[in-house]
Structure formats: structure tokens, C-alpha cells
């Protein structure tokens, strides 16, 4: 892809003029100053409340602390990967059902998509943790966390897939129909391969949401990064230092995922899809 390819920002907005650039520069400086002042007062407050005392930070120099955190991080990665795979497959199936010619199946898939998009993952986790066991269905904490996160993400991914399908030029569908291809073959051989290529960056960026959703693993007592951090907080009474370290870890993970999605977008020559088209196929 050319280094001068048009970005989403360039497509939506004109290049800023001298006055706008000057105002932007002033706003940036003022924001940085306010941010620096805020950080100063936060550190000052931590110092006053003795949160910077060595006893709240020294345990971070021990290998056992980091080993425990890495074990939790591995749990987070496992949930994120499995949830990502399940949500992509389910989202793809919901999208295919919605754009199909079977009206009943299309309505069902549309309702399920809207339902999964509307329900927060935490509510679904409580459902699997509190309601499902009452009917004699027992499952490990891993699946009580993974399945709800997958369901919540699948609704969003179904719309991402549909946006990719709608981004494929209609002329290709019409040309395929003119040579006698069935609707199923058109979707499988022409539309779907192009749509997947278009939305790959968005699928990767959606992993950020999945990773953040794993932070509620404490509900089912699954040993992820946040749950292990809570254990360390209880053992060392180090709330500020522990949450600070965990926040840095999550920022680095999500930043890496975002950079990967940007890289894939540049490689594919496509913009990242962030909102599904309102017009169905």
C-alpha cells in the first residue's frame, strides 16, 4: 500500500488550515500542562497517604510475584483467544443466516445479533454462573467466563462481517448471477473471501474488547490477571501499586493489538470497519 494512501480522517475532513493548526497546538500544550498538574497532585496525594512507601512496592521485585501475575496473564490470554475464535465463528454464522434467503432464519439471526449486542457480558456471566447451575448444568469456571464473552462479542462481529459483505461492490454479485451462479456459491466464492479480507483489521481490534471483558473473571473465580492481582492486593495491602502495574500490562496488550490491526489495515489497503451498514444485503 502506498505511504500516501488516504486515511479515514483524510476522507472525512479537510486538511486543517493555519488557524486550526495553531489552535490545535495551543490546545495540545494546555492539555499537557493540565495533565502534568493532575499527575503531580495525584503523586502528591499518594505521598501524603503513604502509598509510595517501600513496603507497598518492594514485593514487585520478587520473582514469585511476577510468576503469579504471569500465571494470571496466561489465563487471560487463554480466555481471550478461545473467546475470540468462538465469537468470530458464531458472528460469521449469524451474518450468513441474516443475509440468507430463508426469511425465518434471517429474522432469528437478526434478533440474536441485536440481543447479543445489547446485553453486557457481565450480565451474561451472571446468567451462566447463577441461573444455568439451577438446571443441573455444571461447567468449569473457564467456560462460564468464555461463553458469555463470546456471545456478547459475536453480535458485534456479526455486524462487522455484514459491513464487509456490504462493502463488496454490487456489480460483482450481479455479474456472478448473470453467469448462473447460485446465491450460496456467490457468497462462498466471491463475496465472503473479499469481505473477510476487508474486515480482518476490525476483527483483530475487537480483541481489545474481549481482553477487557476478561477482567470480570472474579465473578466466577477464574484465575486471570485481574483475579491474581486481587489476591496480591489482599496479601500485601498494596492496592495502588498493584492496580498500577496491572493497568500498564493491559495498556501494553491492547496497544499491541491496536498496532496489529493498523498494520493489517495498511497491508490489506482497506480502512478499519467500525460500524455496520444500515442497509442489509
Image: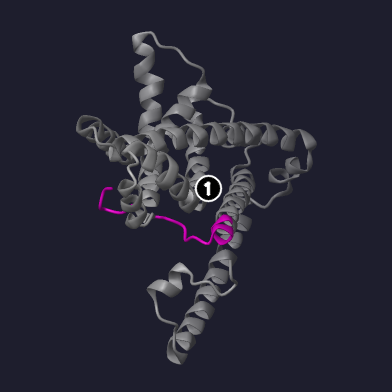
Give x and y (percent) for residue 100.
28, 37
Q: Is residue 266 visible?
A: yes
Q: Mark 1, residues whose alpha carbon is within 10 Å: few (<14), some, or many (≥20)? A: some
84 above or below 48?
above
Q: Is residue 269 magenta?
A: yes
Camera-side residue: 180 or 114? 180
Q: Position of residue 247 (x, y in %)?
A: 59, 48
Whether 261 is drawn above or below 157: the answer is below
Q: Nearer the viewer, residue 147 or 172?
A: 172
Secondary structure beneath label 1 = helix
**In this figure, which residue is indicated by the disc labeled 1?**
204
What kind of secondary structure does the magenta stretch mostly adopt? loop
The residues colored magenta run 264-281
- Give the residue displayed 40% in from the left and 55% down from the top: 274
Residue occupying the far top of the picture: 136
Does 235 sit above or below residue 208? Answer: above
In the rendered image, residue 19 lying in the magenta stretch gets the answer no
Does residue 268 appear left or right of residue 99 in this picture? right
Amino acid at each position: 500500500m502506498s505511504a500516501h494512501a488516504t486515511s479515514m480522517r483524510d476522507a472525512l475532513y479537510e486538511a486543517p488550515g493555519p488557524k486550526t493548526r495553531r489552535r490545535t497546538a495551543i490546545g495540545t500544550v494546555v492539555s499537557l500542562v493540565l495533565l502534568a498538574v493532575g499527575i503531580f497532585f495525584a503523586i502528591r496525594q499518594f505521598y501524603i497517604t503513604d502509598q509510595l512507601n517501600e513496603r507497598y512496592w518492594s514485593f514487585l521485585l520478587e520473582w514469585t510475584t511476577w510468576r503469579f501475575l504471569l500465571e494470571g496473564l496466561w489465563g487471560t490470554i487463554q480466555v481471550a483467544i478461545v473467546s475470540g475464535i468462538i465469537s468470530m465463528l458464531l458472528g460469521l454464522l449469524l451474518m450468513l443466516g441474516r443475509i440468507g434467503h430463508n426469511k425465518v432464519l434471517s429474522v432469528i439471526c437478526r434478533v440474536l445479533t441485536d440481543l447479543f449486542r445489547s446485553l453486557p457480558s457481565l450480565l451474561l456471566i451472571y446468567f451462566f454462573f447463577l441461573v444455568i447451575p439451577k438446571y443441573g448444568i455444571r461447567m468449569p469456571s473457564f467456560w462460564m467466563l468464555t461463553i458469555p464473552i463470546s456471545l456478547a462479542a459475536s453480535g458485534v462481529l456479526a455486524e462487522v462481517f455484514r459491513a464487509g459483505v456490504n462493502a463488496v461492490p454490487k456489480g460483482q454479485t450481479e455479474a456472478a448471477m448473470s453467469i448462473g451462479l447460485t446465491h450460496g456459491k456467490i457468497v462462498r466464492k466471491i463475496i465472503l473471501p473479499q469481505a473477510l479480507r476487508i474486515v480482518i483489521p476490525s476483527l483483530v481490534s475487537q480483541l481489545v474488547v474481549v481482553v477487557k471483558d476478561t477482567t470480570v473473571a472474579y465473578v466466577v473465580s477464574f484465575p486471570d490477571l485481574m483475579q491474581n492481582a486481587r489476591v496480591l492486593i489482599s496479601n500485601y495491602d498494596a492496592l495502588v501499586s498493584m492496580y498500577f502495574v496491572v493497568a500498564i500490562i493491559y495498556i501494553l496488550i491492547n496497544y499491541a493489538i491496536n498496532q496489529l490491526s493498523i498494520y493489517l489495515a495498511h497491508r490489506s489497503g482497506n480502512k478499519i470497519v467500525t460500524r455496520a451498514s444500515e442497509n442489509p444485503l
